[in-house]
Image (cartoon, rainbow, N blue to C red):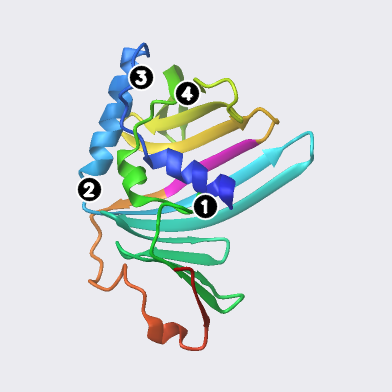
């Protein structure tokens, strides 16, 4: 769960302000960031794959996330996370449990909305990489190399649809040989949502155990 959340967080959470990087790559990343922030909301469906050939590991799952300002609803691995701008609700249907926290920034396994759209990607050096044609789409990859020598990440490839300036996928290569790929299958913007969409309805979970962390 941790690797998935961090990958999704990286996928949408950059405004580039680093120096000594490829100017063309910086221009492209800035276009993507500006485009994403111009939308009232985002509703995304994605596929997440974790692979380690040496360890003979392959895990694949799908999920979706809706984001509007500081609010979001995330569904992944049977867990729903709702952040209404003040409290984070983590709902496990399998355990019939709801965990409530007023602090949305202390848990490294959660998406922080402010980071999704305003994270300053100053931990990487970046440059343009290859261009690939994927399903009749021209995808320009940007390679991001960690600046710190103790990073668990070897490098990251961010795939950007040149026509739309939308993110197509993100590939993260770890120093341990693990490859994690997050691919956006559906990218919808400015969708009509109800006023209560990003609110937790306690009446739906009256039989659940409520765990309040603070």
Q: In the image, is residue 198 above or below residue 161?
A: below
Residue that numbered label 1 is attached to? 109
| Residue 39: image tag | 2
For mark 2, give the secondary structure.
loop
Q: 199 or 197: which is nearer to us?
A: 199
Please report whichever mark, 2 or 1, sits nearer to the chain's N-terminal start: 2
For mark 1, give the secondary structure.
loop
Q: Marks 3 and 4, how far apart in space?
A: 10 Å
Q: In the image, is residue 154 above or below residue 193?
A: above
Please report whichever mark, 4 or 1, sits nearer to the chain's N-terminal start: 1
Please report whichever mark, 2 or 4, sits nearer to the chain's N-terminal start: 2
Residue that numbered label 3 is attached to? 25
Q: 109 or 51: which is nearer to us?
A: 109
**Observer able to see residue 183:** no
| Residue 144: image tag | 4
The magenta-colored residue range is 179-185
For mark 4, give the secondary structure.
strand
């Amino acid at each position: 769960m941790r690797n998935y959340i961090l990958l999704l967080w990286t996928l949408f959470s950059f405004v580039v302000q680093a120096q000594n990087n490829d100017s063309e790559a910086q221009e492209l990343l800035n276009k993507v960031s500006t485009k994403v922030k111009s939308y009232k909301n985002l509703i995304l469906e994605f596929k997440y794959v974790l692979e380690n050939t040496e360890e003979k590991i392959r895990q694949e799952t799908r999920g979706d996330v809706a984001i509007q300002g500081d609010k979001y609803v995330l569904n992944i691995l049977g867990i729903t996370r709702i952040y209404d701008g003040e409290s984070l609700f983590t709902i496990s249907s399998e355990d019939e449990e709801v965990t409530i926290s007023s602090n949305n920034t202390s848990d490294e396994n959660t998406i922080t909305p402010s980071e999704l759209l305003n994270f300053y990607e100053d931990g990487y050096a970046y440059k343009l990489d290859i261009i690939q044609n994927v399903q009749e789409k021209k995808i320009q990859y940007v390679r991001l190399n960690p600046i710190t020598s103790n990073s668990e990440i070897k490098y990251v490839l961010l795939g950007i649809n040149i026509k739309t300036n939308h993110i197509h996928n993100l590939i993260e290569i770890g120093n341990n040989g693990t490859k994690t790929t997050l691919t956006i299958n559906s990218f919808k913007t400015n969708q009509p949502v109800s006023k209560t969409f990003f609110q937790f309805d306690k009446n739906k979970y009256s039989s659940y155990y409520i765990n309040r962390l603070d």
